[in-house]
Amino acid sequence: MQKFLQIIILFLLPFTFQAQDSKNAKELLDQVAAKVRSYDNITLDFKYSYTSPKDNINQESRGDVTLKDSQYYLNFMGITRISDGKKVYTINPEDEEISISRLDENSSSEFTPSKILTFFSSGYKYSWDIPQNVKGRKIQYIKLLPLSNKDSRKEILLGIDVQTKHIYNMIETSKNGARKTFTINSFKTNQPLSKNQFTFTESKYPNYYINKLD
């Protein structure tokens, strides 16, 4: 009987650890989401890289974004995107073109603050992963697995600064082997913003073609 109980305990132990593992991951993710929502605004300076061995692609770029509710001002890969909370203005200096579209926060492709810093709140199975020391900062990784079989992503590793509860980086691996890495170099909060911070001024672009998408 004793040997039988030992076998049962050994069988159940992995499930116990997995449950605790998932609980710890959820608690940390909840803390991150709560911290993000507590700020009036957030300004990020970030580095982005994309590699695809299959297509022989290796790209790197930097960007910055200021976020406040559904409003944002993004500079990335030579493109500027401004959201005033109702419309999104995409400014392409190379083509001298501006696209104007309606902001749809429910769209899966729409860029919003909540999707950048709290995208993990639903649609994923998560587990505790490895910790790392990055220049004296303890970064705890959480592994996210998309619940949808239609998702092209295999997994996402989310690195979280244990002390600040801020996201440090995100490593997204696709099923085809491609990898995207988003690393936050600077995370500033509650900065003084201009009242026109998220306002698009058409007169600044007199020679641009205006493309109204909807």
Image (tube, rainbow, N blue to C red):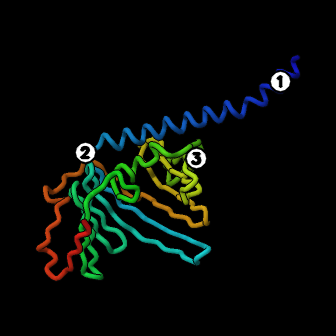
Amino acid found under the numbered disc labelled 1: Gln
What quarter of the picture does the N terminus occupy?
top right
Q: Nearer the viewer, mark 1 or mark 3?
A: 1
**Residue 16 image offset from top left, x and y in percent:** 67, 30
Q: Residues within 10 Å of mark 1 (few under 14, many from 20)?
A: few
Q: Amino acid at mark 3?
A: Pro
> Residue at coordinates 51% horizontally, 69% vertically from top-left?
50
Residue 150: quadrant of the picture: bottom right
The kind of secondary structure element at disc 2 is loop
Rendering coords of residue 126 (x, y %) = 56, 43
The residue depicted at 48 percent of the width and 38 percent of the height is 28
- The tag earlier along the polypeptide, 1 or 3, is 1
Using the image as rendered, state which of residue 126 and residue 105 is in the foreground.
Answer: 105
If you read the primary sequence from the N terminus, does the residue marked by circle 3 or circle 2 appear first? 2
Q: Is residue 122 left or right of residue 71?
A: right
Alpha carbon of mark 1 to alpha carbon of mark 3: how far?
A: 31 Å
For this rendering, which residue is in front, 84 or 67? 84
Q: Position of residue 183 (x, y in %)?
A: 45, 59
Quarter of image, res 18: top right
Disc 1 marks which residue?
6
Q: Residue at the spot x=53%, y=58% of the render?
A: 172
163, 165: nearer the viewer: 165
Which residue is at a point 58% across and 37% down the rendered structure image?
Answer: 22
Checking the image for residue 40, the label placed there is 2
Circle 2 Cα neighbour tier, 10 Å, few/some/many (<14 / 14–19 / ≥20): few
Which residue lies under the disc numbered 3? 131
